[in-house]
Image (cartoon, grey):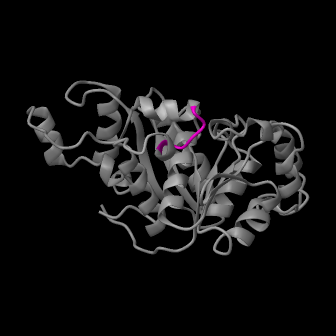
Amino acid sequence: MGGVTDKAPRAVAINVLKGGFGKSTTAINLTRELAERNDRALLVDLDDNGHTTFNLGYSDRYEGENHVQDVLLDGADPMDFTVRVTEGFDLFPSHEALEEVETNLKSAMASSQRLFRNVVDPLLGDVYDYIIVDTPANRGKINDNALFATKNLIVPLRPESGWESGITQTNKRLIQEARQYFDLELLALVPTDLSERLDQDTRDRNLLRALTSREELSSYVPNFAYLSEADWDAIGAGEYDGELPGIRHRASIDKAHRARKPLRDFDPECDQLDCYEELAQIVENGGVVG
């Protein structure tokens, strides 16, 4: 595994063209760890389902005045609509009328640059050290805005049927298309919500085996999810005694959502916090460092 070390203010989109793959959970806990390790981090929720906004306890901001329209289309100050989650961690909430924003962006001047011009450019480095954007699971102008504004991407993957088509579509319809117009860096592929055995034919095994054995994918796998060929041989022989890879399923992660808190603030002893801390390091460094 390779990587670069280039700690600097950075914006990152959490994106995969498939719903239910852990984008909101990843975005919330990554932003919380960045805030823990640095001064200030902002999470921008642009997913139309609003899970991130609801899971942080700001469902009231999901209705009423369409603040996303005000900021992206009308140039309002985004700081007028951010809310404090914890010390150093702010949220720009989603809104139920994002479909209206999507429609209006199609006819707007510089329609794919609004998030960059109105949010990321004025805030990154001056107000926030890091900006994380939770994106919709479908193509469109809002997604285009997220990629152009951040130019960095983290893709969460759950071991479910369809994960391979999810990453294929994300690569083909987002990354490759975007790279025709601007530089877009894939920072990490993040296996999440794992719970099954690896010495049997399980979805967890199939996901991890594919990610860690394919040359075009393996360099983007975080250390907490990486298994070498020697590790796989040991698993096959029943001799593997290392850490279980990937972000593991924990009741605390689900309970934290119900409590409307990031994992660190709900259960600071949860063993999966180390994974989110490494994700924060990946963002800080601009890639996986072996």
Q: Main secondary structure of the magenta part?
A: loop
Query: Which residue is at a point 75% across and 63% down the rendered structure image?
Result: 119
The magenta stretch spans residue 284: no
57 above or below 264? above
- The percent coordinates of residue 122 (x first, y second) are 74, 71
- Answer left or right for 72 relative to 197: right
Between 41 and 193, the one nearer to me in the picture: 41
Give the magenta part as a residue range. 259-263
Quadrant of the drawing holding the C terminus: bottom left
Query: Which residue is at a point 25% across and 39% down the rendered structure image?
Result: 244
Query: Which residue is at a point 13% across and 47% down the rendered structure image?
Result: 230
Residue 122 at least partly seen: yes
- Answer left or right for 58 relative to 34: right
Between 76 and 109, the one nearer to me in the picture: 76
- The percent coordinates of residue 78 (x first, y second) are 80, 60
Query: Which residue is at a point 47% across and 46% down the rendered structure image?
Result: 264
5 above or below 219? below
